[in-house]
Amino acid sequence: MTTAVLIDSKSSKQNATTVQAKDELQPSAAQRAWLVRGLSQPGGKLPLFDESGQRISPRTIQSSIDRGWAEPWFANPTKPDWLVCKLTELGRNALRRR
C-alpha cells in the first residue's frame, strides 16, 4: 500500500478519506490496458498508441494522471500536445490489486 502525505489547510479528516478512496480506485478496462503496457517498458514508459496503431485517448491518459497511476515524463518537442507518461508506483499497485 502506498502512503501519501497531504498538506492542506482544510479538514485533515476529509482529506485523509479522499486520499484513501483515491488509492483504492480500480482502473477501467481502457486504463488497465494502457497502464499494463508500462510494466514491461524501461522506466515504466507508457505508449502513445495502442496495439492497433490508434492514439491512446487523452481522456484515458488524463484520468490516469488524475488518479496518480501515471505521471507526465517529459515534453515531446515535435508533438507538444502529446503527453508522454510513465507508470507510477501507485499505478503498479492498482494493477496488482485486481
Image (cartoon, rainbow, N blue to C red):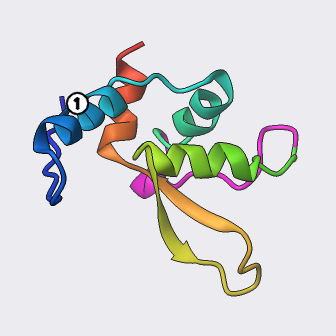
Coordinates of residue 71 in the picture (x, y in percent): 45, 58
Using the image as rendered, state which of residue 88 and residue 65 is in the foreground. Answer: 65
Three-letter amino acid code at disc 1?
Thr
Q: On screen, 89 above or below 95?
A: below
Using the image as rendered, state which of residue 10 and residue 74 is in the foreground. Answer: 10
Residue bounds of the magenta highlight: 40-52
Quadrant assignment, res 94 = top left
Coordinates of residue 55 in the picture (x, y in percent): 82, 51
On screen, residue 89 versus residue 39, left or right, reads left
Q: Which residue is mark 1?
A: 17
Q: On screen, 20 above or below 98?
A: below
Q: Is residue 79 magenta?
A: no
Count of numbered labels shown in the rendering: 1
Q: Main secondary structure of the magenta part?
A: loop
Q: On screen, 81 above or below 28?
A: below
On screen, residue 74 versus residue 13, left or right, reads right
Give the residue drawn at x 14%, y 58%: 7
Coordinates of residue 16 in the picture (x, y in percent): 17, 36
Quadrant assignment, res 50 = top right
